[in-house]
Image (tube, grey):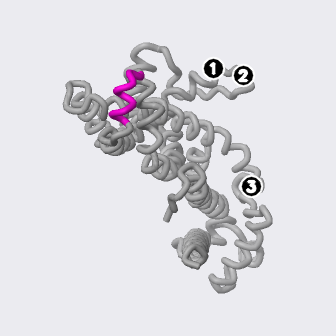
């Protein structure tokens, strides 16, 4: 009877957790979509004039207002735009004369590649650095890693990007300064053009995640099973990556979901620094051209990606670490 009661209580807690998580997700999506709709309604001046131009005749301006519902209440505009967005229709850019979803599909691969590559760099460097700093805590290796992460975390990624351009692109000529090579042009050329932008993003995330993993690994190294593993004479590398990493990586995996969103947002800034043809450069161009419909679609798309990335992490953590509930 007690077991049944505990099972029902566990099921109730799980259901309640998922209900709260779903409610939070829907609330965030509402704020994001309503906020992007408000961008147009609250923009200075007449949005119809912004789209059609100052010299547009009154009948053209009225046609634009009717097309986009500028004369309708804001909540009606939100509902109409959200209903269309759910069906994959984010509107049409009047400046580019192309559907917004088509523009996103063209630019997204560049931003996605930078995000994924910088995430891989972050994991490849932060995991061994955090583990070995914990293993050698108090040594010169630990102090050196702490000093480097402290220095990097204080510098924005775009500043790091400019320094890398001066040192490794202009100074040595090893990497291009602002030329993007697509994968179709060769994987080597593509990775060469993506390396510096991705490294600029990854260094900041490495500085954030390494100390967190180090702190968790220090705690894991005090457990009895670690002492037993050491007594068996296993190698340091096997000890750290097989016995210490898993119990120390719950915080790391949770923060990687947030890091994915930060990297995606950072990639948008870095694209402008390196003049890459991704979503960031397109968003800046849309702001410069006052392309309100494109701005609305891009901002909503980027925000929804961030929300979805965090939801995926919430789903993965209980699978990777049974008995753990991501809140």
Q: Name the residue under label 1.
A: 189
Q: How far apart are marks 1 and 2 (CA)?
A: 7 Å
Which of the marked residues, 3 or 1, is nearer the chain's N terminus? 3
Q: Nearer the viewer, residue 316 or 292?
A: 316
Q: In this view, does 263 lie to the left or right of 222?
A: right
Magenta range: 226-234
Q: Is residue 274 left or right of residue 11?
A: left
**Percent position of residue 301, x then y:** 64, 58
Q: Is residue 181 left or right of residue 265?
A: right
Helix, strand or loop for the magenta stretch, by majority: helix
**Percent position of residue 210, x then y:** 36, 38
Q: Mark 3 points at which residue?
A: 101
**Percent position of residue 250, x then y:** 46, 49
Q: Nearer the viewer, residue 283 or 88?
A: 88
The reply to whether residue 46 is visible in this rendering is: no
- The answer to if 326 sits in the magenta stretch is no
Q: Few, some or many C-alpha atoms within 10 Å of disc 1 (few <14, some 14-19, many ≥20)?
A: some
Q: Do the residues labelled 1 and 2 touch (CB within 8 Å)?
A: yes
Secondary structure of the residue carrying numbered label 1: helix
Going 52% across and 51% down the picture, which residue do you hit? 257
Going 80% across and 66% down the picture, which residue do you hit? 87
Which of the marked residues, 3 or 2, is nearer the chain's N terminus? 3
Secondary structure of the residue carrying numbered label 2: helix
Secondary structure of the residue carrying numbered label 3: helix
Going 35% across and 45% down the picture, which residue do you hit? 216
Q: Nearer the viewer, residue 100 or 9?
A: 9
Q: Mark 2 points at which residue?
A: 185
Q: Are marks 3 and 1 in contact (CB under 8 Å)?
A: no
């Amino acid at each position: 009877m007690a077991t049944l009661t505990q099972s029902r209580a566990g099921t109730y807690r799980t259901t309640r957790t998922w209900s709260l998580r779903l409610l939070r997700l829907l609330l965030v999506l509402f704020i994001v979509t309503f906020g992007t709709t408000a961008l147009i309604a609250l923009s200075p001046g007449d949005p119809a004039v912004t789209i059609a131009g100052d010299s547009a005749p009154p009948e053209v301006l009225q046609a634009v207002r009717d097309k986009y519902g500028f004369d309708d209440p804001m909540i009606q505009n939100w509902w109409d735009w959200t209903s269309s967005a759910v069906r994959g229709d984010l509107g049409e850019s009047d400046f580019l004369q192309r559907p917004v979803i088509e523009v996103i599909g063209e630019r997204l691969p560049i931003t996605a590649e930078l995000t994924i590559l910088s995430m891989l760099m972050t994991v490849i460097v932060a995991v061994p650095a955090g583990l070995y700093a914990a293993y050698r805590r108090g040594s010169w290796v630990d102090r050196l890693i702490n000093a480097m992460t402290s220095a990097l975390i204080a510098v924005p990624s775009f500043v790091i990007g400019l320094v890398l351009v001066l040192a490794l692109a202009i100074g040595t000529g090893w990497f291009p300064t602002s030329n993007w090579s697509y994968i179709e042009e060769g994987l080597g050329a593509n990775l060469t053009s993506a390396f510096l932008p991705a490294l600029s993003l990854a260094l900041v995330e490495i500085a954030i995640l390494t100390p967190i993993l180090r702190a968790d690994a220090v705690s894991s190294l005090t457990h009895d099973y670690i002492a037993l593993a050491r007594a068996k004479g296993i190698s340091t590398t096997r000890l750290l990556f097989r016995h210490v990493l898993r119990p120390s990586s719950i915080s790391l995996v949770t923060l990687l979901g947030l890091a994915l969103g930060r990297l995606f947002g950072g990639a948008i800034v870095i694209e402008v620094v390196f003049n890459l043809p991704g979503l960031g450069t397109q968003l800046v161009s849309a702001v410069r051209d006052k392309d309100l419909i494109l701005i609305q679609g891009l901002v909503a798309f980027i925000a929804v990606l961030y929300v979805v990335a965090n939801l995926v992490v919430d789903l993965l953590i209980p699978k990777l670490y049974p008995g753990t509930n991501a809140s």
